[in-house]
Amino acid sequence: MKKIKFAALFSLLAAFTSLPALHAEGSLPFAVNVGGQQATYKAGEAFAKLEKPVAANAPVSVAAKADMVIINIHKMKADGTTDETAQPAIILLQGTDKGSLDQTMDKQKLPAGKYLLSITAGEATATIQFEIQ
């Protein structure tokens, strides 16, 4: 009986200790492409990033199967924190995995600056830091 308990405990411990390793390898829950750039995560960084700035009407594609994809776009301050005074822009993709940054629900063009893109598809969320030129 002790061997079974030990094996179960060891299995749980192994499962939980491997979770950070998956994130450290640069995996997102699904692939995200914005303006022709694949979002990538580097170990030690808080969020995945796009290497270069994109246009305010850049195409967005999400490699996730879901009936609805919800995209929240949060403006960032110069210090890298989100601007709590700014209303997030929202894009809903229904029955598709493609859209563009100018398809916000409020139809407002996103001004130049740094943003966080939070994309929820199914039960997974990918967060990407990017810049609009």
Image: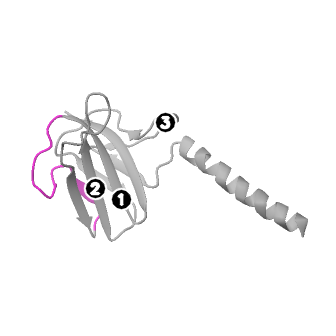
Query: Against 130, is 27 above or below?
Result: below
Residue located beneath label 1 in the image: 120
Query: Against 5, is 91 above or below?
Result: above
Residue 118 among magenta residues: no
Asked which secondary structure carries label 2, the reply is strand
Residue located beneath label 3 in the image: 42
Circles 2 and 3 in contact, beta carbons < 8 Å: no
Camera-nearest residue between 44 and 35: 44
Mark pair 2, 3: CA separation: 22 Å
Task: Give the numbered dot on residue 5.
Answer: none
Mark pair 3, 1: CA separation: 20 Å
Work out which quarter of the rendered image holds the C terminus and state it.
Answer: top left
Place of residue 12 in the rendered image (x, y in percent of width and height, measured from the top left): 71, 59
| Left or right relative to 4: residue 37 | left
Residue 104 among magenta residues: yes
Place of residue 68 in the rendered image (x, y in percent of width and height, measured from the top left): 30, 68
Residue at 27%, 53% in the rendered image: 72
Circles 2 and 1 in contact, beta carbons < 8 Å: yes
| Left or right relative to 102: residue 98 | right
The disc labelled 2 sits on which kind of residue?
Ile
Bounds of the magenta span?
96-112
Q: Quadrant of residue 124?
A: bottom left
Residue at 18%, 43% in the rendered image: 86
Residue located beneath label 2 in the image: 71
The disc labelled 3 sits on which kind of residue?
Lys
Earlier residue among tags 2 and 3: 3
Place of residue 115 in the rendered image (x, y in percent of width and height, measured from the top left): 27, 40
Mark pair 2, 1: CA separation: 6 Å
Decide: few, some or many residues near mark 3? Use Cα within 10 Å; few <14, some 14-19, many ≥20.
some
Q: Is residue 133 visible?
A: yes
Asked which secondary structure carries label 3, the reply is loop
Place of residue 106 in the rendered image (x, y in percent of width and height, measured from the top left): 11, 56
